[in-house]
Image (cartoon, rainbow, N blue to C red):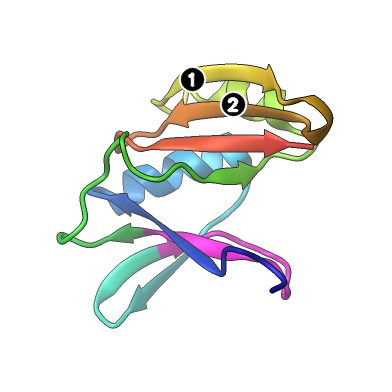
């Protein structure tokens, strides 16, 4: 098994708002797609890398109690955290050492999801 995760989805009730948040915080562009009638904004990744999307699906609601996934913030964790408030989110757990594995932080996005950031 190369990766434990093959794809992830972060639920949203406002895809444009959520896309703007992640693009601002992470400093990247998401690709807008429609998959079988479900609007998505896909995170970029290398050809062999794991990726996922923000998903606008009325059957799934954003929440802070679900699974916690960590997005890559290698070399830019502090920079990402500095942009959270301006992007209308909140830092829930500031930069925290996890020993030799690096640093993590957790943010609340504009939809109410808690999402982690990791920098080795």
CA distance for labels 2 and 1: 8 Å
Classify mark 1: residues with Cα within 10 Å, few (<14), some (14-19) or many (20+).
Answer: some
Task: Pick whichever, 71 or 26, lies toward us.
Answer: 71
- Label 2: which secondary element: strand
Residue 55, position as x, y percentages in the image: 33, 60
Disc 2 + disc 1, Cβ < 8 Å: yes
Looking at the rendering, which quadrant does residue 27 occupy? top right
The magenta stretch is 41-54
Residue in view at x 34 percent, y 75 percent: 34
Residue linked to disc 2? 105
Answer with left or right where residue 60 lies relative to residue 16.
Answer: left
Asked if residue 21 is positioned above or below residue 7 in the image, the reply reads: above
Residue in view at x 22 percent, y 62 percent: 57
Looking at the image, is mark 2 or mark 1 earlier in the sequence? 1
Residue 46, position as x, y percentages in the image: 73, 68
Residue in view at x 79 percent, y 25 percent: 99
- Label 1: which secondary element: strand
| Quarter in which the N terminus is drawn | bottom right
Q: Which mark is residue 19?
A: none
Residue in view at x 39 percent, y 34 percent: 109
Looking at the rendering, which quadrant does residue 119 occupy? top right
The furthest residue to the left: 58
Asked if residue 8 is positioned above or below residue 93 in the image, the reply reads: below
Answer with left or right where residue 97 lies relative to residue 90.
Answer: right
Of circles 2 and 1, which is in front? Answer: 2
Task: Pick whichever, 28 or 51, lies toward us.
Answer: 51
Determine if the magenta segment contains residue 80: no
Residue linked to disc 1? 91
């Amino acid at each position: 098994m190369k990766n434990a995760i093959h794809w992830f989805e972060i639920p949203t009730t406002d895809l444009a708002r959520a896309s703007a948040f992640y693009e601002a915080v992470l400093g990247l562009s998401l690709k807008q797609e429609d998959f079988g009638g479900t609007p998505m904004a896909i995170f970029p990744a290398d050809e062999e890398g794991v990726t996922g999307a923000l998903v606008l699906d009325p059957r799934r609601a954003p929440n802070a109690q679900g699974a916690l996934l960590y997005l890559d913030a290698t070399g830019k964790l502090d920079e990402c955290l500095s942009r959270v408030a301006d992007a209308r989110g909140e830092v829930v757990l500031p930069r925290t050492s996890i020993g030799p594995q690096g640093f993590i932080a957790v943010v609340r996005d504009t939809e109410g999801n808690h999402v982690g950031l990791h920098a080795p």
